[in-house]
Image (cartoon, coloured by chain):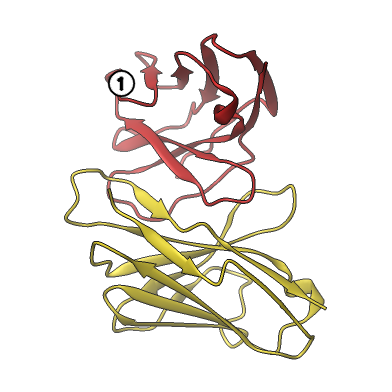
Amino acid sequence: DAKTTQPTSMDCAEGRAANLPCNHSTISGNEYVYWYRQIHSQGPQYIIHGLKNNETNEMASLIITEDRKSSTLILPHATLRDTAVYYCIVANFGNEKLTFGTGTRLTIIP
Amino acid sequence: GAVVSQHPSRVICKSGTSVKIECRSLDFQATTMFWYRQFPKQSLMLMATSNEGSKATYEQGVEKDKFLINHASLTLSTLTVTSAHPEDSSFYICSARDPAGALEAQHFGDGTRLSIL
């Protein structure tokens, strides 16, 4: 699976949009971009995934660049409960083996 | 949505004890489950892939005789840490994917915090 690079940490004011970047320059054509988050002392929670089109669900939006070498997860109106470590993972669709990097520690500030 | 349950959530035991952790898929059948380990301030590391009705597949460096995995049914996988020592203290997390689900993603349990004294 392709490797991803994320900033170690980010802060965002409560109520503002949180934009979390991820670089995956070695992504291959059949690999998807998955985002999970882990709140302290809990298991990871699925957020969203995409192949090349932008995606949106009730939790977040995923913007993937045209060359697919990077993506951005957007939490439109961040709340304190969004404080977590966010993992960007690249994997084949149906590939059940997920490789977690170090992720981005997002802190929402009141 | 799909739910994965882990039990116990926390266990504290003496060195040399064997500890069993259960992972259940509550509303779907999972032919494959995954076991991860997470040390403090580190990311999740895949330990093994648990396959229903067959032997587990272990990642490089994970001792299969130390971490016994049994996946006897489509909804239950167990991880037994045998003769646990303080260095085995960690956060153990399981996951499973619902192959019949519309959402192509893994669902994770809430983890088991293991502390060996």
Q: Is residue B73 left or right of residue B4?
A: left
State whether residue B47 is above or below residue A102: below
Tell me the residue that label 1 is attached to.
Answer: A56
Position of residue A67 measured from the top left corner of the image (x, y, whole percent): 37, 16
> What is the residue that sits farthest to the top in this orientation?
A16
Q: Classify mark 1: residues with Cα within 10 Å, few (<14), some (14-19) or many (20+).
A: some
Q: Residue at x 27, y 45 (%)?
A: B104
Query: x%, y% of residue A65?
Result: 39, 14
Choose top left, top right, bottom left or bottom right for residue B23.
bottom left
Residue at figure coordinates x 53%, y 38% from the top left: A3
Color used for chain B?
A: yellow
Q: Of the residues shown, which amino acid type is indicated by label 1?
A: Thr
Q: Colour of chain A?
A: red
Question: Element under label 1?
Answer: strand
Residue at (60%, 28%) from the top-left corner? A6
Front-most of residues B94 and A71: B94
